[in-house]
Image (tube, coloured by chain):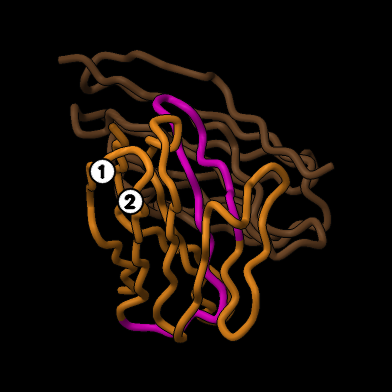
Amino acid sequence: KNQVEQSPQSLIILEGKNCTLQCNYTVSPFSNLRWYKQDTGRGPVSLTIMTFSENTKSNGRYTATLDADTKQSSLHITASQLSDSASYICVVSGGGSYIPTFGRGTSLIVHP
Amino acid sequence: GAVVSQHPSWVICKSGTSVKIECRSLDFQATTMFWYRQFPKQSLMLMATSNEGSKATYEQGVEKDKFLINHASLTLSTLTVTSAHPEDSSFYICSAPRTSSPQETQYFGPGTRLLVL
């Protein structure tokens, strides 16, 4: 069964600090992995997309890593800002289905 | 960049009425669109896959007669919540995949918040 597990479920950090979110998946065969940011009451917005051959991809203060062998990905946020407060969702495509598999998301709260 | 829009952004209706939500891909064609529902503090839940020119594919537990989906063109899919009840109150989001070599990306709409009184 295709699954995507994210941890932690929620995270509270102080403004300016760094944090790392984790995503483990069992989707096979693997096509690509995407991290989305979803602000409350809004649709998800794509941060990064990674294919099998990519290990690291950055988008400003967001850096995603992918280890296709261990089926793990992480999203590192550097120098967090209040506007980073949101839900971060890991989405994996593949597994013999055109329907992507969603993680439950990590809720990040950045405090001043 | 690719943009997916939804209309309306929010709607309040009386119990028993029907509500139509539109999802449009603004600068690309989408033969497939996805409809999700999201309850507060929960993950997106796929409801159905909308296919242009053919019937939608519904996920297990989703009533196809209650949630009518029409993929009228390559840029428009509609979700109609028929005979809405308060438990249908939720955040409805659509997405459309765009394949731009070598990767495919799902672009999400901004969502529609439905409140059924």
Q: Amino acid at mark 1?
A: Cys
Q: Are marks 2 and 1 on the same chain?
A: yes
Percent x, y for residue B46?
A: 58, 48
* Chain letter for the residue marked with disc 2 in the picture: B
* Residue pictured at 76% horizontal, 57% vertical: A30
Q: Chain of mark 1?
A: B
Residue A10 x, y percent position in the rendering: 45, 17
Q: Residue at x 77, y 48 (%)?
A: A27
Task: Residue at the far left: name it.
Answer: A112
In the depicted structure, whether residue B101 falls above or below residue A105: below
Q: Nearer the viewer, residue B83 or B97?
A: B83
Residue B94: image x %, image y %? 43, 58
Instruction: Answer above or below: position of A80 versus B115.
Output: above
* Left or right placement of residue A55 versus residue B17 in this view: right
Q: Is residue B11 left or right of residue A95?
A: left
Give the residue pinned by disc 1. Answer: B13
Q: Residue at x 50, y 56 (%)?
A: B35
Disc 1 secondary structure class: strand
Query: CA–CA distance between discs 2 and 1?
Result: 17 Å
Question: What is the crowding at mark 1: few (fewer than 14 residues within 10 Å), some, or many (at least 20)?
Answer: some
Residue linked to disc 2: B111
Task: Report the front residue among B83 and A24.
Answer: B83
Nearer to me, B65 or A47: B65
The magenta segment: B27-48
Residue B44 lies within the magenta run: yes
Across and down, in percent, residue B42 comes to: 48, 28
Mark nearer the N terminus (2 vs 1): 1
Q: Residue at x 49, y 39 (%)?
A: A89
Hue of chain B? orange
Which secondary structure lies at badge 2? loop
Chain letter matching colour brown: A
